[in-house]
C-alpha cells in the first residue's frame, strides 16, 4: 500500500511539472520553453520529383566533407581512367559517396526526413541547459541538370524559439565546386 501511495504521489508531481509550462497559444504551432521549432519552406521546381532527404546535424558538414574526402585515392583512380567520361564518372561517384556516407553516417533513420513542397515543421525538445545551439539542415546529395548538389544551411537555434528557413536555389551547394576548391 505504501509503495502504491509513493508511486501515485510521484505521478501526480510529474504531471504537475509537465503541465506548468504552457505553450504560446497565439501561434498556430505552439513552442514550449524547452524546445525549438523550424518551419522549412522547400521550393526547387527544377528538381523532379521535388523532394529531398534532410537531417539536422551538430557539425559543419562542409568542413567534414573537405576533411574526409580522399583526394589521393581519387587521383589514383583518375590516372587509371581510360577517357574523360570515365574521369568525370569517378569524380562524380567519389564526391557523392563521400558526402552521403560521411555526413549521414551517424544519422539514424528516424532522424532523416523527406522534404517536399508541403509545409514542414521540425520540433525538438532540448535536454541541454545551453540556450543557443548551431545545427545544420543538411540534405543528401541529389542531381540537378546532371550535376550533384546538396544543402548545408547553418541554423542558430534557441530554446523556446521558432525559426523559418527557405530551402531553394539560392542556397544550393554544388559538390563539384567543393571538389574544385579542394584540388587547388
Image (spheres, rainbow, N blue to C red):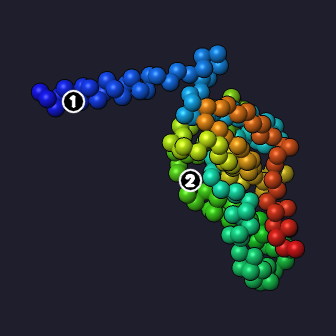
Q: Which circle, 2 or 1, is nearer the viewer?
A: 1
The x and y percentages for residue 137 are 69, 46
Disc 1: which residue:
6
Left or right of 27: which side holds 41? right
Extreme residue in the top direction:
26
Q: Residues within 10 Å of mark 1 (few under 14, many from 20)?
A: few
Res 10 → quadrant:
top left
The residue under the point 68% across, 69% down is: 68
Q: Is residue 77 visible?
A: no
Relative depth, front residue between 126 and 67: 126
Q: Nearer the viewer, residue 101 or 158?
A: 158
- Residue drawn at 63 percent across, 51 percent down: 57
Identify the image quadrant of residue 24: top right
Q: Say which of 131 and 105 sits in front.
A: 131
Q: Quadrant of the C terminus?
A: bottom right
Separation (CA) of disc 2 from disc 1: 40 Å
Residue 143 picture location, percent across and down: 77, 52
Residue 29 falls left or right of residue 81: left
Report x, y in % for residue 71.
Answer: 75, 76
Amino acid at each position: 500500500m505504501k509503495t502504491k501511495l509513493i508511486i501515485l504521489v510521484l505521478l501526480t508531481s510529474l504531471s504537475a511539472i509537465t503541465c506548468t509550462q504552457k505553450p504560446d497559444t497565439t501561434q498556430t504551432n505552439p513552442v514550449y520553453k524547452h524546445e525549438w521549432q523550424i518551419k522549412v519552406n522547400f521550393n526547387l521546381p527544377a528538381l523532379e520529383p521535388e523532394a529531398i532527404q534532410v537531417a539536422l546535424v551538430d557539425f559543419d558538414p562542409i568542413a567534414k566533407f573537405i576533411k574526409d574526402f580522399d583526394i589521393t585515392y581519387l587521383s589514383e583512380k583518375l590516372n587509371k581512367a581510360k577517357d574523360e567520361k570515365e574521369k568525370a564518372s569517378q569524380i562524380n561517384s567519389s564526391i557523392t559517396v563521400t558526402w552521403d556516407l560521411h555526413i549521414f553516417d551517424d544519422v539514424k533513420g528516424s532522424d532523416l526526413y523527406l522534404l517536399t513542397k508541403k509545409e514542414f515543421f521540425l520540433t525538438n525538445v532540448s535536454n541541454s541547459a545551453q540556450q543557443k545551439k548551431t545545427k545544420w539542415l543538411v540534405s543528401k546529395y541529389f542531381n540537378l541538370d546532371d550535376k550533384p548538389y546538396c544543402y548545408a544551411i547553418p541554423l542558430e537555434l534557441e530554446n523556446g524559439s521558432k525559426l523559418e528557413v527557405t530551402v531553394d536555389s539560392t542556397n544550393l551547394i554544388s559538390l563539384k565546386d567543393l571538389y574544385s576548391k579542394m584540388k587547388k
